[in-house]
Amino acid sequence: MTDSKSDNYIEIPEEARRVKPDFVIRPTSGVVKEIKQRIKDGNPPYLDPYHTHTKPLPNSKPIYLGEFDLPEKDIKAGRLSPCPCCSPEHPKYGRKGKIAWFPSEHVIRLLGPDCFGKMDKGAHEQAVAEFKREQQREHDVRYLLGNEARLRRAEAALLKGQEMAAAIDALGKDLRHKIYDVMDIPLWPHIKKGMLQRWEQRTEMVGWTGTNKEIDVLIDHARLHGYRLLDPEAKSLANSFSGPIQAFRILNEHANWNDFVIGMTDVDRHNLAVLLNNSRKAADKAREHTEQMRQLISTVSLATLRAWGMHPGCPCPIHVEFNNEKIFVGKTAFITVHSGIPAVLASGDQVPSIDLPDIKVA
Ligand SMILES: [Zn+2]
């Protein structure tokens, strides 16, 4: 074993070293795809037919066209790739290798991730920044154009969701008014943690003699799903749909979405992609809250409240009765008032969701 030919020395064939000045103009995305596919298939980058395995000439600056990882099994086995910049005959890198085009030399080189930075830090950083900008542009265009049909459906889905949310807002307001004001039932303090409790008598032994003593304890009776609908401070659910609706409306203002998206500046396009992505997240939350609140008027929750209200140990007796159209409440069964369940909620349809992937950030 010599210094130059240690045991991990890689024999580089002449063909790899041969300068291939075939790329006078910027290589197409098809060329980049081909290279990536060959590497994915397990072919070493330094043997790629488009690769020139020579050190970049002085003042030759790269343009980064893509990044690649070697197959996982090669990385694990330590079969890394040599790099023409700094380690032409010894293993150097496995991940985030760069497909670099050198316009002044008309060649492509496959390099280690930051290797060129050691030759020319400024040129490397500039190329990395430009590559990131291009990647982001690609992600944004793919998000906005690739999801056009889904983006277009969002506004209608959200309007439907808002209609349902408004119905729940109205029903909640009416129920609260009937329970707290009309019937004067101080229910909220008893349900505000979502757990219905009731008194139960327990027998406890006290003292040395073991005398039995009856004591009353509050025990958990049942969880009340959707209890926040009865919060006197409940906020409007319908309002939380307004922002997202306004954001997605832009789709319906542009019949030719493709031209609109392509015609935007990169910054505007990215901001739009981020806005729509955030709006989708806000819409998911609004939908979730709406469905949560709506659980109160489910058969299960109303039956739970009814059973608790009639229990002898209930600290806040309440009579609840319901059918598909109305909810009756009173202190007893003899005097009740009712709230009507809006038709849009009676159907049992869920608040529509928006089916959109997350945007990618370069
Ligand atoms: Zn290198």
Image: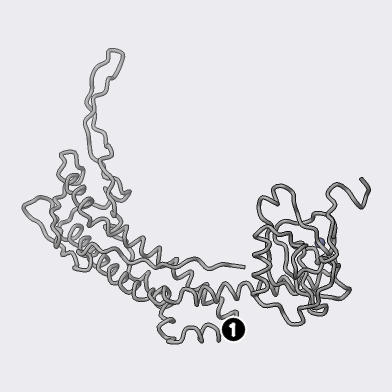
User: Residue at coordinates 11% horizontally, 60% vertically from top-left?
Assistant: 337
How far from the left and from the top, in percent, is residue 263? 55, 86
Q: Nearer the viewer, residue 5 or 207?
A: 5
How many numbered marks does the figure carry? Answer: 1
Quarter of the image where one finds residue 119:
bottom right
Left or right, 186 with reference to 193: left
Residue 135, given in percent of the width and then of the height, sits at 63, 72
* Name of the residue lying farthest toward the right: 2
For label 1, the SS is loop
Task: Specify the color scheme.
Answer: one colour
Task: Give the residue at mark 1.
Answer: 265
Above or below, comparing residue 255 to residue 98 in the picture: below
Residue 80 spot, x, y in % from top left: 75, 54
Q: What residue type is disc 1 on?
A: Thr
Circle 1 packing at 10 Å, graded few (<14), some (14-19), many (20+), is few
- Asked whether the viewer can see residue 87, the reply is no
In this rendering, position of residue 218 left or right of residue 4? left
Which quadrant holds residue 49?
bottom right
| 12 lies above or below 23 | above
Q: Residue at x 16, y 41 (%)?
A: 311
Ligand 1 in which quarter: bottom right
Relative depth, front residue between 253 and 65: 65
In front: 293, or 19? 19
Residue visible at 64% across and 65% down in the picture: 37
Ligand 1 closer than 8 Å to label 1 CB = no
Give the position of the C terminus as an image quadrant. Answer: bottom right
